[in-house]
Structure formats: C-alpha cells, structure tokens
Image: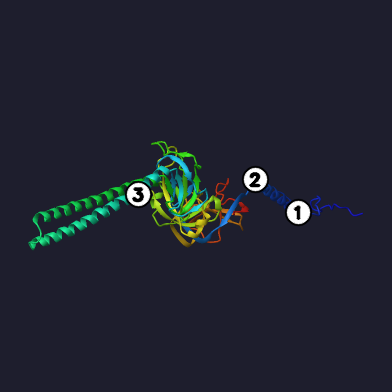
Amino acid sequence: MVNAVVTDRKTGGASSRGLPKWILLLLIVSAAVWGFWHYTRPDPVGVSVKPVTRGTVERTVANTRAGTVKACRRAKLSPSIGGQIALLPVKEGDRVKEGALLLELWNNDLAAQVMLAEREVTASRSRTLSACSRAEVAAKNADRLLTLLKSSVGTQERTENAVAEAEALNAECEGARSEVQVREAQLAVARANLQRTRLLAPFDGVIGEINGERYEYVTPSPLGVPTPPVVDIIASGCFYVIAPIDEVDVAGIRVGMPARITMDAYGSRIFQGKVRRVSDYVLDVEKQARTVDVEVSFIHPEEFSLLLAGYSADIEVILDGRSDVVRVPTEAVTADQHVYVFNPVQGKIERRQIRSGLSNWDHTEVIDGLKPEEQVVVNIDAPDLKDGAPAVQIEDAP
C-alpha cells in the first residue's frame, strides 16, 4: 500500500498534493471580499422609464374648476301678468319654431275688448267716409257758386253759405279721421293686453322644462322674489363652453385662439374649439381662487347633435406650439431642470441637466441635453434616486 504522505527530504515536512497554500488563501480572501461587497452594496433603485421622443409640444392653459356646456340662446319665460293657464300646447322635449304658441292664459275678456275695439274702428271709418264724402260734395258746390258769382249770376249770400258749409263739413271730415286714429290706438292697446296673456317661442329650440299645468294659476315674480319660469326653451343649434381660468394664467388668452374641449360624457374624446370671449372682470368668490370666465365655441356644427346644455366640460387653450422637437414627459423634469437618464446596459442612473423650452402637463421641449430614444426616469420621487445609483426597470410607464 502506497502512503499518501511523502516526506520532504530537505525539510522533513509534508505537502499536500492539492493547490498551493497561497492560492487557497487568495481564494478565501477574494470570497470574503466579494461576500462583504455583495451583502453591503445598496439595493438597485426600481425605476419606471419613458423614452425621449420627437413630436409636438404646446404651451397651454386649462381651467381650474369644471366648466359647463351652455346653449348660445336660452330663455326662461313667464307671462307678464297673472292668470289661469288655458292653453299649454307644448310638452317637455318638444321642438318648436320661432313664434310658436307655448302658453296662453284665460283671456276671453281681453279678446272681447279687442273685438269691441276692432268694431269701433270699423264704425269710425264708416263715419269718416260719410263725413268726408259730404265735405267733398259741399266743396264742389261752393266752387260752382263762386264761379257763378264771378259771372254775376249767383247771389253773394248763397255763395257765402255754401263756402261756410263746405268748410264745416271738411272740419267734420278731419275730426272723423282723427277719431279713427284714436280708435286704432285703442285697438292696439287692447291687442297688447291680449298679447300679454300669450307666450311665444322667441327662437327655434327645444322645450327644456315646464312649470305648470292647464287650469293652474300663475303669477309674475314679485320684486326681489324670483319664481321658477313657466317655460324654459333652449336653442339646439348652437353651444359653447364657459369655464373659469386662474387670474395668473388668463393674461395670455386672446379671442380666436385654438382650444380643446373634453367632457366627462365622452371620455377621452377631444372636441376642437376656439376662444370666443374672455370675461371683462375677475370673479372674487369667497374661499376660492380668483378666476376669469373664458368662453370657447365649438368649431364643427355637426357635433351639436351630441351635446346637451349643462354637460360638465374642461377646456385647454393653446397659447403656443412647436412641432418635431425633442421632448420628454413633464413628470420626468425636476424643478431645477434636471432629468435622470437610465442606462439599461450598465444598470445605472445618470443625473443630467437640460435646457427646456415650451412645456405643458404632458410634455416638455428639450432644447439641449438629451437625444431621442434615451430613457428617462418618470418616478423621480423614488427613494435613493441619485447620480450613479444602480437601478433596475420595474415596469414600462404607460
């Protein structure tokens, strides 16, 4: 049997047939160093990233509170006098034309007064015709006698009597004509009183609300005490949005500027519009920021059929814009104009300063400091996010 240990002739010691001792020692030290580094190194930061792209960046202003879709014309109507509802030919949801009868109070007495006034006008015109016809005959007779008197045929007395009679009858004719004018004025008053019992559609529209039924009594609103209108009519052919803009943002808005409109009723659908009016004063509402109302009209009339007055809406007025520029998500830019660039090959973060241009809620233009296709961190509030920090991508930002 061969011994596993061989005696060294010079030292008398034994040596292992394995690795040299110094190599074993080096391996042990390396493993210890690696273990210390591995277990004491910082954990990689989980980052969500988005790519740097090219596209359009716009500088915009949006409303601070929800706006409202309004009809260009809306009338809340009530009779100017009180009375009992006799006719109510419309119902809620009906579409009516301008001039259509919406409501009529009981008015038989006023209708009778109109009829009486009309007949008095007719009688006055007949009396006027009679008086003026007699005046015309008397004038011709007086002219004939004056001619005969010049020829020494007629008498002075007879001629003077004829002339006086013609003048009297002419005055009677003029008085009859004046009486006709008085009767016509009385007829106009009677018709106006009758008209006060009727509500007519001031424009084409749809009946939004009716507060009343046949045979109910309605009364006009007392001073300082508003009452619900009997008929609410809304024009259906024109809509716009009115929304409050913070006073610090409204200075750059001008009539005619393009705008985008969104509504909760239509989700992410965008309606194109333009600024039609900027209010002339600031709303100072207690416990709220001071705002200015801005009105935006819809550009495409064919979209009116989708709208209802009262929808909540938001507006975004486009103040300026540039196309085909380098841009990053605005959420990736810090307050001091830095971004964190993620290097997926090295698994590290680089903090880089940029020079920005136009900016909005979604994108910020990058004039210098980034190139397309680089990856920027959007969760910049992540703990331990700093220059040179190890990082791992946790998800693709939507």
Asked whether 206 or 62 is in front, the reply is: 206
Front: mark 3 or 1? 3
Disc 2: CA contacts within 10 A as few (<14), some (14-19) or many (>=20): few
Q: Which residue is mark 3?
A: 119
Specify the amino acid type for callout 2: Thr
Image point 30% across, 53% down: which residue? 126
* Residue that sits furthest to the left in the current view: 152
Q: Which of marks 1 and 2 precedes in the sequence? A: 1
Asked whether 129 or 283 is in front, the reply is: 129
Q: Which of marks 1 and 3 precedes in the sequence? A: 1
Pointer 3 with pointer 1, Cβ within 8 A: no
Specify the amino acid type for callout 1: Pro
Asked whether 383 or 90 is in front, the reply is: 90
**Relative side of 124 to 370, left or right:** left
Front: mark 3 or 2? 3
Mark linked to residue 40: 2
Specify the amino acid type for callout 3: Arg
Q: Quick check: can you spot residue 320? A: yes
Which secondary structure, mark 1?
A: loop
Q: Quadrant of the C terminus?
A: bottom right
Pointer 2 with pointer 1, Cβ within 8 A: no
Mark linked to residue 20: 1
